[in-house]
Image (cartoon, rainbow, N blue to C red):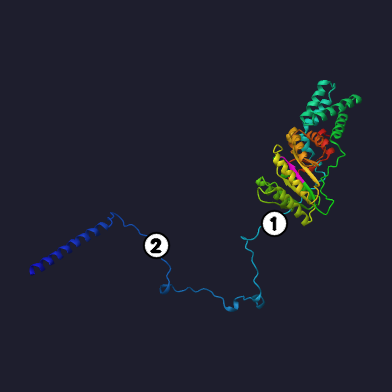
Amino acid sequence: MEIVILAVVIALVAIGAISGLVVSSRRKKQLPPSAPSSTPTITAPPAEPHVGEEAEAPREEPRRTIEEVDLPSAEEAVAEPAAVEDPVVAEPEAPSIEIPEPAAGRLVRLRARLARSQNTLGKGLLSLLSREHLDEETWEEIEDILLTADVGVAATQELVDHLRERVRVLGTRTPDELRGLLREELLRLIGTDADRSVRTESGLDTPGVVLVVGVNGTGKTTTTGKLARVLVADGRSVVLGAADTFRAAAADQLQTWGERVGARTVRGPEGGDPASIAYDAVKEGIAEGADVVLIDTAGRLHTKTGLMDELGKVKRVVEKHGPLDEVLLVLDATTGQNGLVQARVFAEVVDITGIVLTKLDGTAKGGIVISVQRELGVPVKLVGLGEGPDDLAPFEPEAFVDALVGD
């Protein structure tokens, strides 16, 4: 028994010795190696503020007495608190309404721009007519200039015949005489007696209704917006109908034009029924007592019979409120004779009452004014002479011809 107890004691002593050796070796491994020179500096973290019993004593600060505090009066205390507008969530300011430039005399003011684009027609003719001998070759050159300017074959032959006869009778041909002669003949072809005003007054107690039609890319929606500016400048109130539902940006574009001059735009869902939107636009115009309703239709490709039939549907639906006062066909002056093909097809679907020629400032084909009027038997009423918002001008034959032949 004593031997067993002794063995246990020896075992415990051995285990204790071994444990001491292990701990001692671990402590030695954790100690950093002694630096041969100076001891590194250790920066302590900043002390945190004390709270509770460890808090520092408060510092003395000046304090106001109750007599020095400005208290609100009794009336102010019971008054309702004033609302303070939060600039972050405040409603945006309404866009400022622009005042369009007066429509009267616009073409005269834009004459220089028109003259620059028509130099080939006017100056070319005057140069040829000023030759000492007007032989057959010269007259053929005159015909070429007129045809290139899209005057048209029949109108060109008529103009050349009149010029030849009058030059032969005159005998002498001073520059002023030739200019006056050319001016008279061009005015005769264009015509000065036609009613070129845009009909926007209904004989009934309903707004005047203007339908704007044309092929894609002619500037139809822009023309509708600019026409709204022309009417507002003349003191008319306008409602716009965005019946071009096939082009995503058309309704947004038209609404932007309307907001600039305070005209409301009636629109529907993208891809909606154009006839329904046109009908609603006239209905809203009647309800608001507007003077004019302008309806922008989708740009129809004249080769798509179904789309042209739909345009006829728009016309029929609108006429349920009353007759259309004006149907304006927008043509791109740079398309030349192709524009006449478009004009013929549109005239078969709707009764065109007037023509708008856009981009007339960017082409030397001013003769399209003559040929398109002869083709449709309706006058050119408006011309586009630039990209500015007020560059749509009522067509004035005298100002137009003066820009061609110069002073």
In the figure, 246 relative to 184: above or below? Answer: below
Which residue is painted at 62% across and 63% down in the image?
86
Residue at x 39% of width, y 62% of height: 45
Q: Is residue 93 left or right of residue 381?
A: left
Residue 330, compared with residue 97, is above or below; it is above
Proximity of marks 2 and 1: CB atoms separated by less than 8 Å = no
Residue position marked by numbered label 2 in the rendering: 45
Q: Amino acid at mark 2?
A: Pro
Give yes or no for residue 166 being in the magenta stretch: no
Cα–Cα span, label 2 and label 1: 57 Å
Q: Residue 318: which numbered mark, if any?
A: none
One can see residue 283 in this view:
yes
Mark 1, Cα crowd under 10 Å, few <14 / some 14-19 / many 20+, is: few
Residue 348 locus on image (x, y percent): 77, 39
Q: Which residues are magenta?
A: 211-215
Task: Mark 2: give few (<14), some (14-19) or many (20+) Cα within 10 Å.
Answer: few
**Residue placed under numbered mark 1 in the picture:** 94
Secondary structure, mark 1, is loop
Majority secondary structure of magenta residues: strand
